[in-house]
């Protein structure tokens, strides 16, 4: 990995914490603290992503070397690396939480690759930082595999996300109380290496705004220069334009989550990327039975603040907090309000466009499609129906002679149903919807073959089902990393039929319904 060319603009351009010792504290007037990763006893490879490695101009053989393991476990520094943790704050579950910061993320610096792209390299679980509060700065294998697999699955699904280069075990054991119920137990430790153009969060701006406007301005100017280089010179108009872009990319990201059935689980403002990337894979989950009220996060079990169907609204709320933070640089409410209002309109439009693509229409019919989609979602929400399987199989609901044969259609969709027998009411509701849907399809200009192609591009066959991730984790904890690598491989082509991988496209088995790690996840990681 000696070929990596570091150009660490974050630490060159932004103010450093004057204290260099590593102990928990409040850091003021600085954007980062110098910190070195903890030395890990016996790091070993679990999995790496060859596509993420390519972003660092690296080949598979680089990833298979001992020095790769030492570098990305945090044991060895490459020439040009400068390691640091950044300070940020955030609203957690709607309340201002004060200083948070990289409590267990350590940045190694930024590189520029052959394509001229800048990639920040960050280790998660590499040891304590000044922002670790009372925690250890480490991560367990369970949550690290979840972060690694989901980051890379999202890329191939076409959802904006931070990347994951590798997941390594550290050879050390950590004690965690998974369900916060007084049952702590040792678990294997791990480190994930993440990549992103930057790891800047809404919470960075919020935290600097709380301190002073100069620090805020310095950070905003830095962000625009580095992450939004296409924007013109730094002035009020540019700040507004920048905020509008953040609204647009956040909206686009959430529409994509809704398309694939992803629930982030902890949409606190410190977990919102300024680049509209999915960031911080914690107690996230994938909808198996379609349920807009579902959240995998047990901390949120009571309020469902971050449930699937709430995500667009929460995105808006978070943008509102960002607007508040940057307001002193703009000193006018109206342009910020306008951008926030546009978010709502844009989301509605893009969401409907996305949903009509899922249904296989070549364009939106404004008169009919909104109702058609709503009726479907009401139906899906009332039954236990697997979202991924339902949409995927809907593409192949067809007929020989232009009239819909309901029995055949229902048979085609039945692998998505969690109950064996459809009640008379369910059958009637589905029949009613399919008949209207069928008519709408017939009016569309594209051929049946074209429709299938269109639908199979937006309705994945394979997603990182919660129970599959859990099975892979349990094997890895026993030292067998084959299933992590199998899932990584299958999820490289989530829209393709992979006949020998049908077992990874099955609805959630009954045993996983209430199992910890499958449907119930905590922030413990
Ligand atoms: P999260 O809920 O994962 O987004 O984390 C919220 C805050 O807690 C962030 O500032 C994290 O860096 C910090 N944090 C989470 N887990 C740990 C840990 N094991 N050690 C230190 N800080 C942590
Ligand atoms: Mg976080």
Image: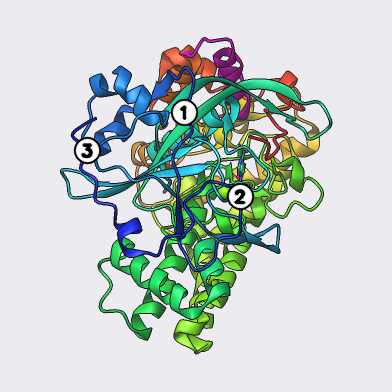
- Which quarter of the rendered picture does the C terminus lie within? top right
Q: Is mark 3 on a helix, strand or loop?
A: loop
Most extreme residue toward the left is 114
CA gap, disc 1 to disc 2?
19 Å
Q: Mark 3 points at which residue?
A: 4
Residue 98's image quarter? bottom right
Residue 76, image x, y percentages: 35, 29
Tell how many labels.
3
* Mark 3 or 2: the one toward you: 2
* 270 left or right of 165 in image: right
Q: What stretch is highlighted in magenta?
A: 465-481
The secondary structure that most of the magenta stretch takes on is: helix
- Can residue 493 be seen? no
Sooner in the amino-acid sequence: mark 1 or mark 3: 3
Q: How is the image coloured?
A: rainbow
* 263 left or right of 352 in image: right
Q: Mark 1 points at which residue?
A: 39
Q: Name the residue under label 2.
A: 24
Residue 17, image x, y percentages: 46, 60
Residue 28, image x, y percentages: 54, 66
Vertical position of residue 151 compared to residue 207: above or below: above
Q: Is mark 2 on a helix, strand or loop?
A: loop
């Amino acid at each position: 990995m000696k070929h990596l060319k570091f150009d660490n603009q974050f630490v060159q351009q932004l103010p450093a914490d004057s204290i260099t010792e590593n102990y928990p504290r409040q850091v003021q007037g600085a954007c980062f603290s110098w910190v070195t990763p903890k030395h890990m006893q016996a790091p070993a490879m679990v999995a790496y992503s060859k596509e993420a490695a390519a972003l660092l101009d690296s080949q598979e053989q680089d990833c298979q070397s001992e020095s790769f393991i030492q570098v990305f476990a945090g044991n060895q520094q490459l020439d040009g690396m400068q390691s640091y943790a950044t300070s940020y704050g955030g609203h957690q579950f709607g309340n201002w939480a004060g200083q948070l910061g990289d409590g267990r993320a350590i940045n190694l610096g930024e590189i520029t690759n052959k394509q001229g792209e800048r990639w920040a390299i960050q280790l998660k679980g590499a040891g304590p930082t000044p922002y670790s509060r009372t925690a250890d700065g480490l991560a367990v294998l369970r949550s690290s595999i979840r972060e690694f697999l989901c980051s890379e699955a999202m890329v191939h699904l076409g959802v904006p996300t931070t990347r994951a280069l590798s997941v390594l075990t550290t050879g050390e054991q950590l004690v965690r109380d998974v369900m916060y119920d007084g049952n702590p137990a040792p678990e294997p430790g791990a480190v994930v290496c993440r990549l992103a153009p930057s790891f800047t969060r809404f919470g960075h701006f919020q935290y600097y705004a709380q301190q002073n406007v100069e620090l805020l301005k310095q950070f905003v100017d830095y962000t625009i220069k580095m992450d939004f280089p296409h924007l013109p010179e730094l002035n009020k108009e540019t700040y507004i334009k920048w905020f509008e872009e953040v609204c647009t990319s956040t909206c686009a990201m959430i529409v994509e989550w809704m398309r694939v059935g992803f629930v982030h689980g902890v949409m606190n403002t410190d977990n919102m990327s300024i680049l509209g990337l999915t960031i911080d894979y914690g107690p996230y989950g994938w909808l198996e039975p379609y349920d807009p009220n579902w959240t995998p996060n047990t901390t949120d079990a009571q309020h469902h603040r971050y449930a699937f169907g709430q995500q667009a609204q929460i995105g808006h709320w978070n943008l509102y907090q960002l607007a508040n933070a940057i307001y002193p640089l703009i000193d006018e409410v109206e342009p910020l309000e306008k951008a926030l209002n546009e978010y709502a309109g844009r989301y509605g439009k893009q969401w409907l466009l996305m949903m009509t693509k899922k249904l296989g229409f070549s364009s939106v019919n404004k008169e009919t499609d909104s109702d058609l989609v709503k009726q479907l979602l009401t139906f899906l929400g009332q039954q236990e129906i697997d979202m991924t399987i339902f949409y995927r199989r809907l593409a192949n609901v067809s007929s020989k002679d232009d009239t819909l044969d309901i029995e055949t259609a229902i048979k085609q969709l039945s692998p998505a149903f969690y109950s064996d027998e459809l009640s008379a009411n369910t059958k009637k509701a589905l029949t009613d919807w399919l008949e209207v849907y069928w008519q709408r399809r017939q009016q569309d200009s594209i051929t049946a073959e074209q429709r299938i192609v269109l639908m199979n591009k937006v309705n994945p066959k394979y997603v990182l089902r919660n129970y599959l991730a859990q099975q892979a984790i349990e094997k890895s904890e026993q030292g067998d990393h084959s299933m992590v690598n199998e899932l990584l491989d299958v999820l490289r082509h989530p829209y393709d039929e992979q006949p020998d991988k049908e077992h990874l496209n099955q609805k959630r088995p009954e045993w996983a319904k209430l199992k910890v790690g499958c449907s119930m996840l905590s922030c413990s990681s």
